[in-house]
Amino acid sequence: MCQLLGMNSVKPADLRFSLTGFAARGGLTDHHADGFGIGFFEDKACRLFVDAQPAATSPVAEMLKHYAIKSRNVVSHIRKATQGDPMRLENCHPFTRELWGRHWLFAHNGDLIDYQPESAGNYQPVGTTDSERAFCALMEELKQISPREPCSPDIVFETLCSMRERTAEFGVFNYLLSNGQSLFAHCSTRLWYLVREWPFSNASLV
């Protein structure tokens, strides 16, 4: 399955150090070689970079290792395809959609077997992954709750919890979701996270 990397920061920060090690796992130190993507939020919009090449050899990933894009919320993904054609740009995460006048980013790790959610038509997948279908279903559900005005963070969280239970019946549903204000992370297997506070101590890539 795929691997996820997210960052939520009080102050805008760049992710180059962590991205260097993460990108290497996309075909060099690990076997997640079916595509790469990363999104950096700047207020309500995001800069999104995706590449169907392995992250370890992607010119896009290499450029980003030297480009200090500072952001408070970042979502990144390296892909090991389980559903959807491998090494296809439209199947690379993160996926993005607009809701309530903001970009939303979603990246998924897992495999949802026979997952075919119903859709009212506002959000349709471009690619052929179960991941993008789940993202469209989530956006649809939030839009149905409040078509025009943003929901409170509590209502968004309750909606995510409800959908998590229903979606996880089909398989592993680990994901990162952000709208540039918050970063939501769910893990039904193992979740690793790091909290750092200034002044930072030295760290080494392993």
Image (spheres, rainbow, N blue to C red):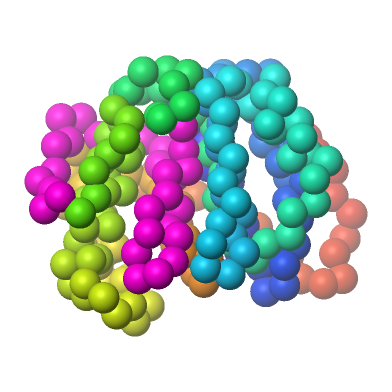
202 versus 146 height, above or below? above
Task: Report whether 173 appears left or right of 95.
Answer: left
Identity of the residue drawn at 33% across and 77% down:
150
Quadrant where the N terminus sits is: top left
Looking at the picture, does residue 92 appear above or below residue 12? above
State yes or no: residue 100 in magenta.
Answer: yes
The image shows residue 66 at horizontal and vertical percentages of: 83, 41
Position of residue 15 measured from the top left corner of the image (x, y, whole percent): 73, 51
* Residue 51 seen in this snapshot: yes
| The stretch drawn in magenta includes residue 94 | yes
Location of residue 107 in the rendering, given as x and y in whole percent from the top left corner? 44, 44
Residue 181 shown left or right of residue 133 in the figure: right
Horizontal placement of 190 versus 157: left or right?
right
Please tell me in which quadrant of the rendered image residue 64 appears: top right
Taking the spot 28% from the left edge, 57% from the top edge, the residue there is 139
Q: Position of residue 61 (x, y in %)?
A: 69, 33
Q: Is residue 195 visible?
A: no
- In this rendering, the answer to whether 88 lies above or below 101 is above
Residue at 64% from the left image edge and 27% from the top image edge: 55
Q: Is residue 153 left or right of residue 34?
A: left
Q: Nearer the viewer, residue 178 or 197?
A: 178
What number of labels is visible? 0
> Please, is residue 188 above or below residue 194 in the view?
above
Q: Quadrant of the C terminus?
A: top right
The magenta segment is: 92-121
Question: Which residue appears at 89% of the width and 54% of the height?
Answer: 202
Q: Is 113 in front, or is 60?
A: 60
